[in-house]
Image (spheres, rainbow, N blue to C red):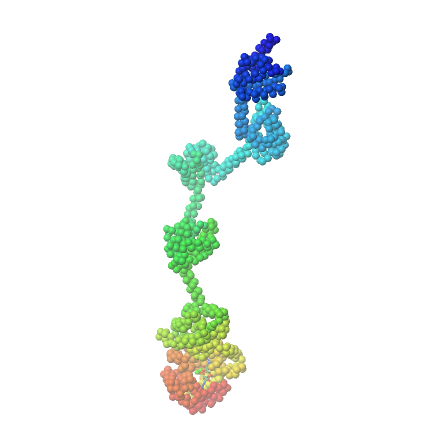
Amino acid sequence: MSALLALSQAALDGVAEGVCVYDADNRVVLFNRRYLELFDMSPDVIRTGITYRQVLEHSASRGNFPADRFEQIWRARAELLSARKPFSTEQVLPSGIVMTLNIQPLSDGGWLTVCDDITRRARLESALRVQTERIEHAFAHMSHGLTMFDRDERLIICNSQYLEVYGFDAGVIKPGVSYREIVEHWVSRGNASGLSAEKLYDMQMSEIRGGNSQPTFLTRADGRVVQAISRLMPNGGWVTACEDVTERLRAEEALKRQNFLFDAALENMANGLCVYDKDFRLLVRNSNYLKIYGLAPHEAKPGMHLSDLIRTVVGHGVYPADFPIDALFEELRQRLSQMKDLTVQRRMCDGRLLAVRYRPLTDGNCVATYEDITDRERAHEELGEQYRRFDAALNNMTQGLVMLDSNLHVIVCNKRYVDMYRLSPDVVKPGVAMREIMEHSCAIGNHPTATPQQLYDDYVEKLRRGGHILHRHLGDGRIIKLTHRPMEHGGGWVITYEDVTEHRKAEARVAHMAQHDPLTDLSNRVLFREKMSGGLAEIAARGGKMAVLCLDLDNFKTVNDRLGHAIGDQLLRWVAARIKECVGENDTVARLGGDEFAVLQRGPQPQSAEQLARRLVEVIGRPPPLENHVIHTGVSVGIAIAPDDGLDPDELMKCADLALYQAKAQGRGAYELFRPEMEAQARARHILENDLRCALEAGEFHLAFQPQIRLGTGELTGFEALLRWNSAARGLVSPAEFIPIAEETGLIVPLGEWVLRTACATAAGWPDNIKIAVNLSPVQFRARGLVAMVTSALAAAGLDPKRLELEVTETALLQDDEATVAVLHQLRKLGIRVSLDDFGVGYSSLGYLRKFPFDTIKIDRSFVGSLGESHESGAIVRTIASLGANLGVETTAEGVETAEQLELVRQAGCTAVQGFYFSKPCSAGDVGHIIEQMNPVHRVA
Ligand code: C2E
Ligand code: CA
Ligand code: CA
């Protein structure tokens, strides 16, 4: 036994582990040396038979565990032992030795403890752990997803990026899960659309197993792309590195596109382009570059030096041989070193002009562009020419012109504008703000009523509303018309300036002229009517009275005809001035035409109007101060009162005219207020006029004949034909009543012709020595064809012209002297005698006697009638008679009613007589009887 024990002991001592065996009483049965060594326990203490507690106490005393924890450890061990189950624990001893302690219950109730120094292993393990941690750390922090599978395709390890890259659920993807399950899981989440899990798995596995380590790409449900590279491991498993390459692919795509665009841009740009490196070696060039210089592709290859390229070009004769290469490079280096561009223009041998621009790049390279600017230069020249023309046009236009940009700054303006406003050219320049110009313009006094701010604000506001025209009244009185038109492009404005001062004045003049009489500057008929309408409207609305006075000058026509239009005009102006003097300042004076004037007068009526009329008659009745002429003129006035006589302007005018007509009928220098009966009179006159018109055709006229007797011999020399109207409606009408109306209406012309023809025809049946005298109205002189008519009447009657005497009055001579005298001469040439009728009334100018040698002067019967009573009449008759005797002209006294009168005219020296004393005018039928009867008169005389 002891031998066996010794043997066992020897064997035990030979093993590397410490071994100790306890019996069922927990007493040491057997132990080896290693056991003591491991715990640094003494063989003196540890002997067979000592208890486990004693062993522990000793171990504690050796410092293998803290003494104060002894009881705690003991109790734990005792419990473990009593459980009789194997267990192992690890213990680090103070010596640094790491121990494993294995306790194994034995069948005899004892137990065995085996202790092993695992310090080295523990160290290895710790190192391994650190290593693992590092790997895990690396795993966790690497940018890639990384995963490792074993030969059974089960996941050994993966990092969170792996989960993230594929979008895996961390709860599903754990070590141990199979690759197939992973694929199924991924596909089930909608990834790798279009592929079944089965298919995807097969594809992936064949990739992995194929071992060619090529990247594979999978697309996630959200479109992101995962790239994976797998590598087989010797043990049959594999490692896969994966990565989300969505951005990278996009960037690559973008880059690809960019390169494409760059190439496209390069090749499609209009200009030639080269990139040179810092040594001027060609890096890139486009085909336009080759085209411009006519180079073949091999003549300009990357790597070639710029100077060589230029030499080739010169060699082709594109540039002259004296191309300054050295100068170019010198300048180029200098400019590029300062990071500045260099642009050179070169004329090519074929005349084209090239602009070459070298531009430094930040990476030290240099870009050169080559542009054929031949056309551009030509266009530029043309533009310059156009600009010069524009400039010439701009500065030669009569209008001022300014172009403003949308900020109201001057783009361009012309000199006329600057001059017009008298602006300083130092202020008004392209680019200056309109606001500044306005400040300047205000400062030099152009706009005395506005501040620059007001001016500008107003201006901006007007422009805001669009194109417009405005008129500026400058400080010096000029008026400038501004026309603002928006420019078609760019929102600016074109403004033209026109000095419309004269234009405006002319307009005002025209406006004035339209309403005023140029001769007297009085209102004209238009303005008068306007004022009258205004006045009448006011009366209608507010009451009050207004008079309309119509004025007609007496004898104006005579003055005009006798003294000429210049004097006539002078007279009219004088009359106008007198009227103006007489009226109130609120009254309106107008010249309605010819010698017609009118006055509108407010105030108490009719007193005021009558007062005015009296005054006008008096003042205008005074002789006007016309140089060297003594003229008697005067004025007749007709008055109508509103509202009494009407409220209608035309009606009122008519009333005033009727009153005027009446005033004139009364003779000179009278005024009349309108009375309603005037209308009746006018109507009656109107009817008379109408009757007169019909009378000729109705055969209501006949002639009466009054004998004319020569004094001296007492013989009957002829008859005067006197017109008689036996109106069916009104009986016998006196020629004194109807002749003036026939003259006014012009009826006297046909009527006078009838008289002449009838008189001639009648006289043709008389003895040859009996003459016929026919009265001619002045109106007949004014009508043309008098001579022809007389000739025709004589011819028709077959009457010797010598037997016809025509009686004309002075008034015939008053009009158009010369023409009348010419007609008289023509008549005289025919052999007709001409007498001056009604001599002594009217103007009785002896001048007429000198102008035409009348055959007879007929002394008006008003003198003859008053011969007995008035010395004056006697003197006049005597004077005329002796005048006639001196001139060798017959003098006939008219209206001799008594023997006394006959005696007086005979004594006065008259050569002939006519009058009731001898015979009243008698009918044609009585003429023969009278001729016979007159013989006794003859004898008596
Ligand atoms: P008259 O030419 O001076 O004609 C003479 C007028 O005096 C006639 O008036 C005649 O009847 C009138 N008379 C003749 N002797 C006497 C007399 O002793 N005492 C008075 N108190 N009167 C006498 P009558 O015929 O009424 O003509 C008036 C005027 O009408 C004429 O004045 C003449 O101017 C104009 N007249 C008459 N017939 C014609 C005519 O055929 N043509 C034109 N144009 N005028 C005419
Ligand atoms: Ca007569
Ligand atoms: Ca007469």
Q: Looking at this view, name the residue that lies furthest to the top.
A: 3
Could you say which is closer to the camera, residue 204 or residue 178? 178
Question: Residue 760: where, in percent of width, then height?
Answer: 48, 81
Question: Residue 341: where, in percent of width, then height?
Answer: 41, 38
Question: Residue 141: where, in percent of width, then height?
Answer: 53, 29
Give the side of residue 134 with respect to residue 428, left or right.
right
Give the side of residue 906 with respect to residue 763, left or right.
left
Determine the image quadrant of residue 209.
top right
Could you say which is closer to the camera, residue 426 or residue 877? 426
Residue 748 visible at all: no
User: Is 381 placed above or below 675 here?
Assistant: above
Task: Please report the residue visible at 46 percent of the width from the left and 37 percent of the height from the top.
Answer: 273
Ligand 3 image-quadrant field:
bottom left
Task: Please report the residue visible at 58 percent of the width from the left and 9 percent of the height from the top.
Answer: 6
Could you say which is closer to the camera, residue 917 or residue 805? 917
Task: Please report the residue visible at 43 percent of the width from the left and 91 percent of the height from the top.
Answer: 939
User: Is 459 placed above or below 527 here?
Assistant: above
Q: Is the N terminus in the top left, top right, bottom left or bottom right quadrant? A: top right
User: Is 502 placed above or below 34 here?
Assistant: below
Residue 357 visible at all: yes
Q: Is the C terminus in the top left, top right, bottom left or bottom right quadrant? A: bottom left
